[in-house]
Amino acid sequence: MSGNPDDERLEELREQKMEELREQQQGGGGDAEAQREAQERAEAQQEAVLKQYLTDGARQRLNAVEMSKPEFGEKVKQQVAALAQSGRIQGRIDEEQMRDLLKELQPDQKSFDIRRR
């Protein structure tokens, strides 16, 4: 990687996740503690990706969306993380690009057109 501390942290989190998945497959585990730890690691990895690829303005906009619509905010976070992991993000996402991404991912709004005769 580029030697960036965030990149090193992401790689470390990925390795931990892969090791954890291997252990679960071998043990056939339904251990609640291990599942909770896996969830925490996944969330930490997602947050690290978001910090790396989002500007402060974009992160603030995403947080505002998440406060009003938690499910939609989580969907957007997952989408940004997926784009970053697939290498489809060049540079950082600014507030304008985040606004465009939110418009793309937003479910179609139903509009009502009332006409009087």
Image: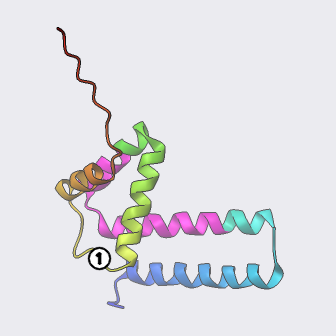
Going by the numbered disc 1, the residue's amino acid type is Arg
* Left or right: 61 as drawn, with respect to 11: left
Name the image quarter holding the C terminus: top left
Query: Vertically, is 57 above or below 66?
Result: below
- Where residue 73 appears, x then y in whole percent? 42, 49
* Count of numbered tags: 1
Crowd band around label 1 with a 10 angstrom C-alpha radius: few (<14), some (14–19), many (20+) = few
In the displayed structure, 72 sits above or below 15; it is above
* Residue at numbered disc 1: 88
The percent position of residue 20, horizontal first and vertical second, equals 68, 79
Depth order, front residue of 111/6: 111
Write the residue at 28% across / 30% down: 111
Instruction: Tell me where residue 89 sits by quadrant.
Output: bottom left
Display colour scheme: rainbow
Q: Is residue 29 positioned above or below 4 on the image?
A: above
Q: Residue at x 32, y 33 (%)?
A: 110
Between 83 and 66, the one nearer to me in the picture:
83
In this picture, residue 104 sits left or right of residue 48 = left
Say whether residue 82 is magenta: no
Question: What's the magenta region?
Answer: 38-63
Q: Is residue 47 left or right of residue 109?
A: right
Give residue 35's quadrant in the image.
bottom right
Q: Is residue 35 left or right of residue 107?
A: right
